[in-house]
Image (cartoon, grey):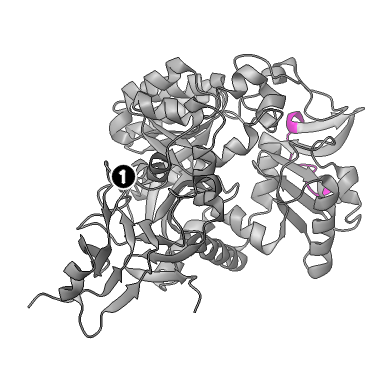
Amino acid sequence: MTDAADRLLVNAVVHTLTDPDTVFEAVAIRDGEIIRLGDSYELEFLEGVETDVIDCDGRVVLPGFIDAHTHMEQLGQHLVHADLSTADSAADCLEALSAQADRDPDREWVLGFGYDDSAWESGPLTRADLDAVSEDRPVVAMRVDLHTASLNSVALERFADDLPADDLRTADGEPTGVAVEDAAEAVRRQLTADRDELREVLSAATQYAVEHGVTGVHDKVRGSSAPRVYRELAANDELPIRVRIDYWSDHLESLVDVGLTTNAGSDRVQTGAIKSFSDGSIGSRTAKLQEPYAAVAAEPDAECESADHERGQWVVDPDELGTLVARADGEGYQLCIHAIGDEAIEETLSALEETSDPGGRRHRIEHAELLTDGQIDRMAEAGIVASMQPNFHRWAGEGGLYDQRLGEERRLRTNRFRRVLEAGVPLAFGSDCMPLDPLLGVQHAVTAPTDAQRLSVTEALRAYTHGAAAAGFDDDRLGTLAVGKRADLVVLEASPWTQAERIDEIDVAMTIVDGEVVFDGREA
């Protein structure tokens, strides 16, 4: 007698997202593995006394979403501290921060995360703004791209010895409270949660992830505490998603010493790539460009510390980056390098092309927002992964952030997913937690302004499933639905193919990881 399935999903529209996509009506799962796909009546023989039969009532079933670029600690901080991501103005941010201060009067720091000033006339939050929240407690607000931190006077005083002067914006010779790049990173490091709070933060973030259909993330991790907490959660069966940890480059020698190589780890928590930077961000005017920004000043009346800032700045000098790439690749590690501006992409691509087997290592360029045609073709030839964020198209419209910073010609060259895919570049989608919401990202990809930026629904979904899995060496077990693969699935209340203009409004009905239901949002 055939062994029964642990779980059957029937009366569904099951998209495998293989190439080409194939549609079934039911899927059978045993021991966390897909054992059969077919029509509902064909799988009836796999139903046993203890089989959990889920009637999907015509809902759409897809492979679980894999977010190839996340910052889960920051996501959790959005949930635990003041979430500024929906603020439409500086005044909205100050209101949210003041409310957070009142809610948690015993916490020393007042923290907010995710503000986006690109549509504001006032520019980034300043110390004068944040002093209105509190003149006694340190107040810090992180911009959505994490490349800018805004500090009140108390926080500036606390960080006085830790912030490089070159990355502190000034006006009339006085600090404005706006810190970028290395200074912003120094602030972020100091705000890292302690071990107990980190468990709370990561638990909140992973719960949020499964509620949005995410079954796996590639988390860019700076400190050493998060990997420990992830492994503790996994050991206690409290980690609902798969986590691939991309370690900051300052961990490289320690990883080499202990032999923790790319792809090492458990089924639930793995070591990923070595993460580094080349440049900053377009929003902070620190992405490194071949030609100057459309506007030079970082904010109204602010002094620019160097004429070189007209084209952005290096976060990691190209020579230093080249040395790191050679060292990490020589030790067998995958590399994922943040490069946004065309000049930064050029230097990063050149360094990765010099490695022994860039395609075999699946080296990645993160963001790659302003690729030239030549760079796209070189990435395809080398097999270097483009790890991109479709939700960044929120800034791609006429008059948006890209228009303001880059001008029309370069705006139309940003995030050209169609051009990347048709060139044969491996394409993986992630969110950068701006916000973590794959369905929102898919909508941006299928409704992008130009043909070169736009994908079909199927192509966008594959970039968020198979493409992301392949970027993490997981395409043999994840990313599509097939017999023998792990049962990571998402069940949607509606079809992305039938409401392509409003994919972001589709609710997640259920999320399944390794055959287990980790989120059930269906109405009782």
Report the residue marked by disc 1: 473
Is residue 291 inside the magenta stretch?
no
Query: Which three-letter amino acid code belongs to the residue tagged 1?
Result: Phe
Residue furthest toward the bottom?
Answer: 49
Residue 439, percent across and down? 50, 50
Span of residues in magenta: 157-167
Residue 456, percent across and down? 42, 38
Give the residue displayed 34% in from the left and 45% down from the top: 466
Residue furthest toward the left?
Answer: 1
Work out which quarter of the rendered image holds the N terminus and state it. Answer: bottom left
Give the residue displayed 73% in from the left and 43% down from the top: 149
Visible residue check, residue 110? yes
Q: Quadrant of residue 119?
A: top right
Residue in front for this viewpoint, 21 or 366 = 21
Give the residue displayed 74% in from the left and 15% down from the top: 307
Residue 38, percent across and down? 21, 61
Q: Quadrant of residue 355?
A: top left
Residue density around tag 1, few if under 14, some if 14–19, many if 20 or more, within 10 Å: some
Q: Is residue 449 above or below residue 72?
A: above
Q: Seen in the image, is 385 located left or right of residue 503?
A: left
Q: Seen in the image, is 24 located left or right of residue 257?
A: left
Residue furthest toward the front?
Answer: 498
Residue in front for this viewpoint, 454 or 153 = 454
Q: Is residue 186 above or below residue 135?
A: above
Residue 189, percent across and down? 64, 49
Residue in front for this viewpoint, 38 or 80 = 38
Visible residue check, residue 389? no
Is residue 161 inside the magenta stretch?
yes
Q: Seen in the image, is 23 located left or right of residue 523?
A: left
SS state under label 1:
loop
